[in-house]
Image (cartoon, helix red, strand yellow):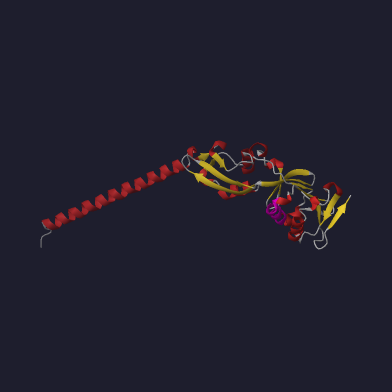
Amino acid sequence: MSAFPPPKLKYKLALVNIQEQRLLRIAFWRSCLVMLCAVSLCLMTTSSYWQIKDRSQIQISGEKLASKNTVYTALNFAYPQFIWTVNGLDLTQKIESIPSIATAKLNKQLIPPALIISLQEKVPVALASSQGKVGFLDSEGEWIAQEFYANIDVDFSLPKLKVINYQPQYQQFWNSIYQLISLYPELQINQLQWNQAGNLFLYTKLGKVFLGSDLSRLKEQFKIMLKLQNLPNYLERSQVAYIDLSNPDLNLIQKY
């Protein structure tokens, strides 16, 4: 038996050797490519291009009554900050802590890097005084200080409805009261006033109406006001001090 491999076997061994060297070169260059990509990605992600550096990269939409400065102040954003490290939930919660903002949505834009904030504001439905301060009420009865509606004099008509001496404990009744006021515009209710004892007075086209402190029968009280719409035809408004509807079953007209 020959000590040297036959030509065919020798040829095959050479081919295997060439293939092994080729695979080794491929593996080497693949490793180099992976390392190059990793280094490039690392350099890219740490580039200042991807940072939020100033207010111009925070875009706010949906604000009409609140000012952008109010939103920026609430954000208390730490510049600079890489866009992927920005905590969107935290920023959203900060914005929604502004009394005049109902909801906020934040989206991240990569190219160019920017934060896009969409706002939904609470629309004021009444002017209101509360605990010696003047502000606004929304439809849910939340009292909001006027400072949170910086643009209200420019872009929004002031509400015609006024509420005097509003207190936090009255919020549980406000939704029902406001719905009934909207439901019966013919009553022309333009002012509500609570006194120190917690009794509620309405100022309507009938004159002053006393509802008392128990507001569990509001619907009945409003229906009685509707029935009394023709009262001015029979009695001069100047003669009526107020209409007492504190007991809907026994309505009284108090004269001067």
- Most common SS among magenta residues: helix
Residue furthest toward the front? 234
The residue shown at (57%, 37%) is 55
The x, y position of residue 84, in whole percent, is: 51, 46
The x, y position of residue 74, in whole percent, is: 64, 43
| Residue 74 seen in the figure | yes
Q: Is residue 159 left or right of residue 5?
A: right
Q: Quadrant of residue 215?
A: bottom right
Residue 93 magenta-drawn?
no
The x, y position of residue 129, in whole percent, is: 77, 45
Q: Is residue 132 left or right of residue 182?
A: right
Q: Quadrant of residue 11?
A: bottom left
**Looking at the image, is 254 positioned above or below residue 134?**
below
Q: Is residue 150 left or right of residue 43?
A: right
Residue furthest toward the right? 256
- Residue nearest the viewer, comparing 107 with 125: 125
Highlighted range, magenta: 175-185
The x, y position of residue 46, in whole percent, is: 48, 41
Q: Is residue 44 left or right of residue 53?
A: left
- Residue nearest the viewer, comparing 209 with 138: 209
- Residue nearest the viewer, comparing 54 with 66: 66
Rendered-image quadrant of the N terminus: bottom left
